[in-house]
Amino acid sequence: MTVLVTGGAGFIGSNFVLDWLAQSDETVINLDKLTYAGNLQNLAALAGNPRHVFVRGDIGDVNLVAQLLAEHRPRAVVNLAAESHVDRSIHGPGEFIETNIVGTFHLLEAVRAYWGGMPEPQHSGFRLLHVSTDEVYGSLSADEPAFTENHRYEPNSPYSASKAASDHLVRAYHHTYGLPVLTTNCSNNYGPYHFPEKLIPLMIVNALAGKPLPVYGDGRQVRDWLYVKDHCSAIRRVLEAGRVGESYNVGGWNEKPNIDIVHAVCALLDELRPHVDGISYREQISFVTDRPGHDRRYAIDARKIERELGWKPAETFGSGIRKTVQWYLENREWVNAVQSGGYRDWVAKQYGA
Ligand code: NAD
Ligand code: DAU
């Protein structure tokens, strides 16, 4: 048995592939374009593993995807490939439209053709799982209830609009062609291999480098945080038992303002790697210009996946953030390697010299 994973060299994708291969005897075909966010070092532990087949390529390349499907006959496709960073989508939405919308469309076309030609019982057992985000639901005020799967779509950034469009395409392919799809809408992930353009890894690496910790606006924006390994277990569970055509919200029940997240990172670094002069890492916090159109609050109601599929996160925020900070302390070479010339160009563009 084989599964095709797209975006398997990115943050969530590489955690997903590593966990999948550790927990099952199935082969993974890993299709990834290796953009700035894709990193084969994340998968170094799989070197020589015959159950991991890496293919560099684009989900929008219909011929390549068709060829991979015909050759490897996967029982499922898990789509994690995307442009994922909101700030980059504000600077340049083009890649987001190209990969998240057009790329997903081409992937759907290739999968539809493959699934249409599958014999039974493989045809009935096939699934396409599309990984999406809570950002498609828009922004909540402080007293609104958390997003359920029935919340209207109200995306506010080019990133979330492109993800919303891809969700709609996935939904339409089920409704129109009967393609057996599943969609997951997850909150903010954190953990190992998180690219240091996102809040938590950026704060850790900047803190250790003695640089400012840039907090947007007043730092009171709220996100729900989920340890990445819990997201991976949720995807596996939905793939295993989710109802075809349904969406499942995935979250950690960990709503926190950004400033509390930054304080938590500083406290752990103060404990695990204190400054020699005893000054807290909090002294490095610097409030900077807010993100344009910054969503104020996301909150996930994850009761459906718990009720229907029995999934709950294993980590608390306290246990997950400790593991994460420890991982970054122990993997400085990984950090140094991803902080390439391209990464430095991004930091200069976003935060100034
Ligand atoms: P990431 O940016 O770390 O990784 C994306 C991966 O996709 C990279 O390896 C990249 O090379 C690859 N990729 C990009 N364009 C491609 C293309 N055209 N063809 C093939 N591969 C391509 O992203 P991530 O944080 O791991 O997110 C993975 C998925 O999960 C995305 O769909 C994202 O929208 C979703 N998601 C992320 C979070 C989060 O907090 N990180 C939360 C909810 C949902
Ligand atoms: O909610 C799920 C989404 O979470 C995913 O769909 C996205 O792919 C993922 O990138 C993430 O989006 P966010 O915009 O929430 O994540 P980010 O880490 O960029 O920012 C988290 C919060 O921290 C957000 O309110 C902006 C703020 N922030 C971010 C950065 C990079 C800062 O205050 N300073 C920063 O330097």
Image (cartoon, rainbow, N blue to C red):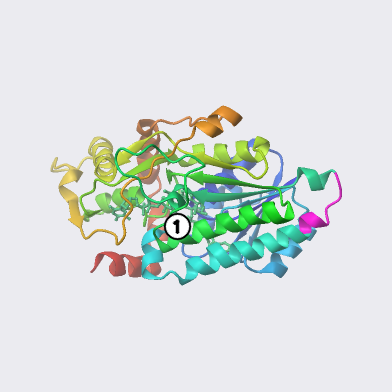
Image position, residue 238 (x, y; %)? 61, 38
Write the start and end of the magenta stretch as one range: 114-120
Total marks placed: 1
Task: Provide the residue designation for mark 1.
Answer: 160
> Which image quadrant for residue 142?
top left
Location of residue 105 in the rendering, given as x and y in whole percent from the top left corner: 63, 64
Quadrant location of the N terminus in the rendered image: top right
Secondary structure beneath label 1: helix
Q: Is residue 315 left or right of residue 271?
A: right
Left or right of 228? Residue 20 is right
Residue plotted at (39% across, 64% down)? 88
Q: Is mark 1 within 8 Å of ligand 2?
A: yes
- In the image, is residue 162 part of the stretch drawn in magenta? no
* Residue pictured at 46% horizontal, 38% vertical: 251
Residue 91 at least partly seen: yes
Name the residue rendered at 59%, 65% in the picture.
Answer: 103
How far across and down, in percent of the image, does residue 323 sit?
40, 36
Front-most of residues 23 and 296: 296
Residue 119 is inside the magenta segment? yes
